[in-house]
Amino acid sequence: MSTFQGLEIAKTGLFASQQALNLTGHNISNANTPGYTRQVIDLSAIAPPTTYGMADQWGKAIGGGVNVDGYRQIRDQFLDQQYRRENTTLGEWETKSDTLSAIEGILNEPSNTGITTVLDNFFNSLQDLSKNPESLEVRAEVRENGISLTDTINTIYQHLDDQENQINSTIQSRVQEINSYADQISELNNEIYRFELTGQTANDLRDQRNLLVDKLSEIVNINTYEDSNKNFRVDISGQALVDGNSAYTMSVDNTGTIKWDLAGTPVNPTGGILKGLLDMRDGDGTNGVKGIPYYKQQLNQFAYNLATVFNAQHAAGYGLDGSTNINFFNITDTTYNPTAEYAKNIQVSSDILADDGLQKIAAASSASSLPGDNTNVLNLIALRDTKISGLNNGTLDDFISSLISNLGVDAQQANQMQTNQSTMVKQVDYNRQSVSGVSLDEEMANMLKYQKSYEASARMITVMDELLDTLINKMGVT
């Protein structure tokens, strides 16, 4: 065995302790860095030399000290996958909760300006007209309340349109965000691959990539895996978004469909913010998915049936001027058109809005009983309690109440799901951080441990130096 082997052994201990201290400092410095994963140093004993003649004078061989094998991240892949899965669900329900809350704000029920209130005001003014059918002042109130009712329906529908347009804009932004993340991940894949060709592990670059994948998981459902060649891939519903250093982008066409740019096929997200946005933009009630189209359709159905039933009864009556067959509202379709935007376009008819329109409000049931006949206006009032086939055999009030109630249930469910998922994500992230997060107490303990190890190795070198000095310079000296 070489006389200087003791120095070499001590040197490896000094180097290993120094590297361990450096790594501890790196952990401490990044304790608050988002996405950072705690790293540990892997050490192994250097085996005794096996070359002939390397044993000591007793025929024994000792090891060569300590070797630094590498720096390893403490990360649980199962918890990563669970976090991303739950984060995807959270993103979807947060989006739905926000949108349904916005729809609740648009309907604004109960309030002094909601449909229920303006419908009350309209029928109350008809009630007043029944008591004084010849009064132009009361007739003016009927017309103004009719205008208020149609304006309210128009405004609600326009706000739903605006919300739908906003969602479209948000979908565009989120698709661009996905593309940006895909580009960044593919670039990191390339950097990691080149770095690890040297035999080292690109821990900090991998942290950056994992953080991007975490963020991406909130927007859209993803699957990730790394093959034996360390080729990292990100899939959306089986289609590659990132494959090694290649990123596959997507875009929104003029129909609002999200498509892969290269393949031209639709992107079908099954979770995340993107799924929530698409459900709220496109959900018409089919398969239980109720988004903005569903509530617009419900308003259209209400507006059409209100106008149609009211017009039919109004046209059967007579105005103060003897006019008859006059529509109160401007909707005249004889059958319901599911593609028409009745709620957006319903108005008080031009006949009623004309200068002599107050005369044409049909309170009487016959010309001979004018001006004091109120029979037809009583029939109009009775429509409020009439079950209408086009409104699911419910009354006007029943239909609106059911719409508001269903919206409330949907919003409550979305809020509850969001709350539950938020709790779940926090719990999984807590478990994940307990594994991969930096504990300052633990790092301080490691720092003291490696400091003592460094000092001991340094002391070992000093002792070996003194021994060699004795051997070289003092042996045989009298």
Image (cartoon, helix red, strand yellow):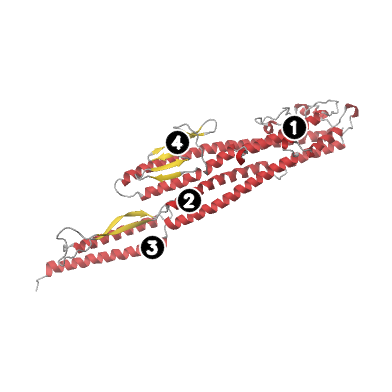
Picture coordinates of residue 161, whole percent (x, y): 62, 35
Q: Secondary structure at mark 4?
A: loop
Q: Which mark is residue 381?
A: none
Picture coordinates of residue 272, whole percent (x, y): 52, 44
Q: Which mark is residue 307?
A: 1
Query: Which residue occupies the foreground of this view, 250 or 469?
Result: 250
Tag 1: amino acid: Ala
Q: Secondary structure at mark 1?
A: helix
Q: Secondary structure at mark 3?
A: helix
- Give how far apart the Cα atoms at labels 4 and 3 are: 45 Å
Q: Residue at x 89, y 32 (%)?
A: 373
Q: Is residue 116 left or right of residue 42?
A: right
Asked if disc 4 and disc 3 are in contact, CB closer than 8 Å, the reply is no
Q: Residue at x 60, y 47 (%)?
A: 414
Tag 3: amino acid: Met
Q: Residue at x 36, y 50 (%)?
A: 203
Tag 4: amino acid: Thr
